[in-house]
Structures are given as C-alpha cells and as structure tokens.
Amino acid sequence: MKILSAGIQHETNTFSTVLTTLADFRRDSQLGDDFAGGEALRQLYAGTNTIHGGYLLGEQSGDFALEPVLCARAQPAGLVTDEAFDWLVDQVVARFRAAGSADGILLDLHGAMVTQTYDDAEAEIVRRVRAQVDSQLPVIVTLDLHANISAELAAASDMLIGYETYPHVDMEERGVEAAQLMVRIVRDGLRVHQVFRQLPLITLPPKQCTLRSPMRELIGSLRKLKSRPEILSATVAMGFPFADIPNTGVSLVVSADEAATAEAAAAELSDLVWGLRDELQPELVTIETAMQRAGANAPDAGPLIFADGSDNPGGGAPCDGTVALHALVDAGFAGAVVGVLHDPETVAQAHDAGVGATIEARIGGKSDNLHGATLVAPAYVRALNDGQFTHRGPMFHNLAGDMGRMATVVVNQVLIVVAENRRQLLDSEMLRIAGVTPEHARLIVVKSAVHFRGDFERFASEIVDADTPGIHRPDFGCFRFSKLRRPIYPLDELDEL
Ligand SMILES: [Zn+2]
C-alpha cells in the first residue's frame, strides 16, 4: 500500500496588514528553498511530535509505505499571496503525480489559511488535489485545533481529524490516528460516515487552552466519546478568531461506521460545547497588577508569567510590542525577563558591539503603531548566541528550531531577549540558549498566548493573560467583523443553538 503525504500550513490573521509571501514560507523552510521531500523530509520529522512524525511512526506498522513529498509552513501573519499559494499547491500536485499510482493521500493542513483569493484555502487545496491527481483516492486531512472548518472542506475530504490539545502536544498521535484510519479504509474497505456541524460560537485563545477549565473537562469528554468502538474519530475545532471570514469559530466533526451514530454523537458534543460558552471568555490582567503580585512573591517562588497574547507571533502579531516592557523598565523591576522580541536591528547592533558593551538601543515597536512605542535606552549586552536549538518541551518535541542570531540585553535591570526570526516563545530552550534561566526570574513577559504553558507551567508561580493592545488581543471589542456569519455568540445575543 502506497500513501502519499504533504503539508501546507498557515494560520492567517486577516487583521494583519502584512502579506505572507513565498519568501516567508522559504524563510521558515527547514528543507531548503524547494521544500525537499522524500528522505530529507523523513530525517527532519522522524521521532518528532509533529503530524509527519506521526505518519512516519504509523508507517513502522509495515502496513503501508509513505511517500512524503513536501512540508511547508510560514509564521502566522496576514493573507497568503496568490503567488505563494498557487506555487505551493502546484508543487504538491506535481510531486503527487510524479509519485505514480497510490492508494491514499494524507494532508497535513492547518485549517485557518486565508489567501488573497480564497477565504477557505484548505477546501481549495483538497479540491485541486482531487481534480488534478485522482478524484477517487481517499483523502484524510489533519487540522489544527484552531481550524475554521467549512462544510465544503468536510464534504471534500473522506475524513477530517483535528488536534485535541492546545498547547498542541498531540500532533504525533493525530498523525498516527490518520495513518491507521487510512489503512482501515484502503485495506479493510472501512466505510466512513462523517458529520460536520458549525456552532454559532466564536472563542478566544486564552480559554481555548486544554490545560485549563472548562476545556480540560471538555477534552476529557471528547476522548471518552472517541473511545467508543462505533466512533472512528471526533474533533472539536475551537477556531482561530482573528479572521474575518464566514467560517470563523467553533465546529465539530464526528466520523462513525453508521450515519445515525455520527449524528447522535455530534449532537451530544455540540450541546456540551454550547453549554460552556460563558466560561470560555477570558479575564485580562494589566502589567501593573502583575508587577504587584510578582513583587509580593517570595524570591524563589518561580516566575509569574504575563502571557502577552495580544502580541503573539503564533497568531500573526508582530512580536515586537513594548507596552509591558516600558512599564517594567520604568519600574526598574529586578528579575523581569521579556522575550523573545523580533528585532533584527538590535541583534545586529549587539553582535557588532560584543558581550560587555553598552549600546544605544532602539528596541521593539517598529512593525506598526498598535503594540507600543520603541524603547530608546542604553542597553548592556549580556549574552549573544546563534539561535540554534532543539525543542525540549512537549510541543514539537525533538524538532530542530532556528531563532536566527539572538542577543540578551539589560535595560534598568530588565532582561530583554531579542532574535532575528519572529518566533513564538513556546519552549523554554529559546530562553536558555540566550543565557536566561527562566526558573530564576520573578516575572516573565512571554510572546505567546497559550503554547508556552506546555513547557513553562511546571515552574511558574502563576500565569495571567495580559491586558495589552494588539492584533491578537483576546477581546472581541477590538475587532470589526464584516464577513463573519451572524448571529454568533458572544457578538450577538443567542440563547439557543
Ligand atoms: Zn493552533
């Protein structure tokens, strides 16, 4: 049995004005400008907690041979250009065709990609693959928990399988699940009845976290449901809210061997999620309150973490916001760490000057005027490094990472970690390689909404969701939606499903 696979991933923040180009996908490619497939791709992903890592683990059963042709992803930002989208999908199609006859296709997609032309880019990918490769082959698509799933995508795919967790720590498991179901479809002739439901509900990242209530309990119920023998797979996609498209928001997918079974389970899940709608609204804390609370902690209590989700590059924000940084520097807050800011200019300046030098720094606030002003101050260069690391936390475990060159500078007792690449601080290795031991900090501003919890929660004294401005601010009051389906809770009053 021969199974083809490919991945194209982007989470598109339509409120960002920064287009995502092919150069961005190439910059984030760990397999060269042509996105090498085959052996090189296998070597990168084997043994990692990723979807392709899961496909490769599934292959070890000996039931099928995997032919992975391409994996491309770019850091979340604004609309993907038509040029980038067409080029990448054309490559996937051409490589699938060149691979010759196959028995099935596994697609590793995100589910919240929006291009200049397509609000629903994933449905267009599946449509093109079916039209240009083989319309009869089974296609199983894995999706992020932040997928904004459409009825068209569900109809175009034999099965959709979404991540269960946020932080996304079950990617390898979902990859294995997809591979195993593909084997049952191809070898055993398994018939899949897939039911898709969209809820009139939109939610924000902080409370989508599955380490916290009420999502922790919801995911428990989802797993129980999935363990029933008649259920083949089930997904609760919470959606990526910073996208003004009709399909933004919560959706459910259930697959079973009988249509009625899938329908009943989907109804059950949808009542469960709808019942939690008020508990899914976040509570935001200012940096001033965070400083008070962290200041009152014992010095060795572990850091209070200020999750600056409004400036989360993982959701398309610039990652050079300075609102919390200014407050900490003004206060001279000893033991504070801010990271990792995207600031290639400061990195270059620090590397030119060398460790021990003091530079006239202009830090952050350079991408737009929505995330705070540039901090202009003399900064002491404390450490420099090349930004190469391996993920040691649960998310992307064992996968190589590249921050670009990095620098750690100190301004009025505040440690500021800057990097050439715009990356979400989701693994503490990103600080450790910069000479910062996060356990010893008193307050850490992390440029991440939730993913950091997978690695940082174990040593944090407390975690708060930041009340800062930005294009990823978890507050619907800041966004104007014009294409979103209505009515939708909590933007509209809705009591019943
Ligand atoms: Zn996600």
Image (spheres, rainbow, N blue to C red):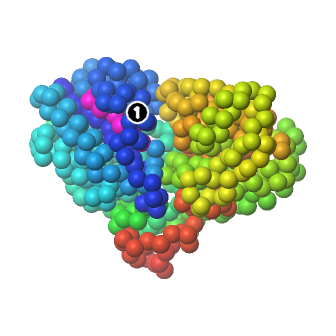
Q: Is residue 313 above or below residue 179?
A: below
In the rendered view of the protein, which quadrant contains the N terminus?
Answer: top left
Residue 78: horizontal and vertical position, in percent?
43, 55
Residue 416, by quadrant, is top right
Q: Is residue 254 visible?
A: no
Secondary structure beneath disc 1? loop
Q: Is residue 297 magenta?
A: no
- Extreme-bottom residue of the structure: 493
Which residue sits at x=71%, y=61%? 285
Horizontal side, residue 320 vs residue 327: left or right: left
Q: Which residue is mark 1?
A: 29
Horizontal side, residue 206 vs residue 384: left or right: left
Q: Main secondary structure of the magenta part?
A: strand
- Callout 1: 10 Å neighbours few (<14), some, many (20+)? some
Q: Is residue 38 visible?
A: yes
Q: Is residue 210 above or below residue 116?
A: above
- Which sits in the foreground, 114 or 195? 114
Which residue sits at x=85%, y=48%? 332
Tell me the magenta residue range: 68-74
Residue 5, by quadrant, is top left
Which residue sits at x=75%, y=57%? 287
Q: Is residue 77 above or below residue 248?
A: above
In the rendered view of the protein, which quadrant contains the C terminus?
Answer: bottom left
Residue 173: horizontal and vertical position, in percent?
42, 35
- Disc 1 residue type (three-letter): Ser
Which residue sits at x=57%, y=66%? 475
